[in-house]
Image: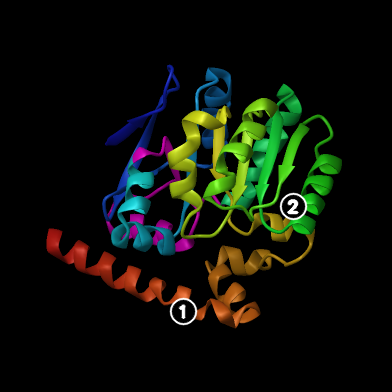
Amino acid sequence: MSQIHLEDGVRQVPVTSILGVNVSKLGMRDTVDVLERAVASGKPHQIITANPIMIMAALESEDNMRAMREAELIVPDGAGVVWAAEEFGDPVAERVAGFDLLHELMKRGEQLGWTAYLLGAAEEVVQEAASRLQNQYPKVRIVGVRNGYFGESENAGVIEHIRQAKPDLLFVARDAKTQEPWIARHKQELGAAVIMGVGGSFDVISGKTKRAPVFMQKLRLEWFYRLAKEPSRLPRMMALPRFMQTVKKAKKSTE
């Protein structure tokens, strides 16, 4: 059983290798327990919520693969990642969706008095998401909010603001191509213990978009729901059949 080790005594996590990316085999509850230890350590931990599109991006981009390899924890967000683990004969406990993990961390933060910072999306979206999360989890203090529209020249100021706020949890929603590499480059400077890319989660939390119905999530068809709602996602979604083909080819080469 392959394992990774989170810093500062946080317990070892069993992983399964999917096309060279080490994905945690833990279920949601155990994942949150691990991240509670990460917060207690005070040291930076990048959490990647991996889906097939992200894994294909890592295979095609050195920056994205480096972020995957250097991340302290990668969880199986996409249903395709869960499927791939099954194909390789080393399954994960369950899908750990990033949207749900965000909420589970906020619930744990309610119990332990954590603080959180929201970075990313449009200004009105992130502000509304922060307002709704603060109402839902009043014992988690949201210590900062910042939209995701900034360039390299503004990095230092954004990082300093986060550092001064000293959040336990930093949720980052930026462009899919740059989100994880940006976190990987700056996690040591940011001063947060758990730093997690959350993609379009702020859009859903704010009410701008809707998440797929539960029955579609259970049928592993959340991707189809999102595509139906946003046809412009089709070019990006073409990574899904390429991912399946790559998994099948890799599996065949080991048989």
In the displayed structure, 53 sits above or below 65; it is below
Identify which residue is drawn at 50% across, 23% down. 43
* Between 225 and 229, the one nearer to me in the picture: 229
* Between 115 and 12, the one nearer to me in the picture: 115
Amino acid type at circle 1 is Pro
Query: How crowded is the residue under tag 1: few (<14 C-alpha within 10 Å), some, or many (20+)?
Result: few
Residue 87 among magenta residues: yes
Identify which residue is drawn at 41% across, 27% down. 6
| Res. 126 mark | 2
Alpha carbon of mark 1 to alpha carbon of mark 2: how far?
26 Å
Q: Quadrant location of the C terminus?
A: bottom left
Spot occupied by residue 143 in the image (x, y as percentages of width and height): 75, 32
Spot occupied by residue 246 in the image (x, y as percentages of width and height): 26, 68
Give the magenta part as a residue range: 70-97
Q: How many marks?
A: 2
Kindly indicate whether the residue at mark 2 contacts the one at mark 1 (C-beta within 8 angstroms).
no
Residue 166 appears anywhere in the view: no
| Res. 235 mark | 1
Identify which residue is drawn at 14% across, 58% down. 254
Amino acid type at circle 2 is Val
Secondary structure of the residue carrying numbered label 2: helix
First in sequence: mark 1 or mark 2? 2
* Between 119 and 206, the one nearer to me in the picture: 119
Q: Looking at the image, what colour scheme do you see?
A: rainbow
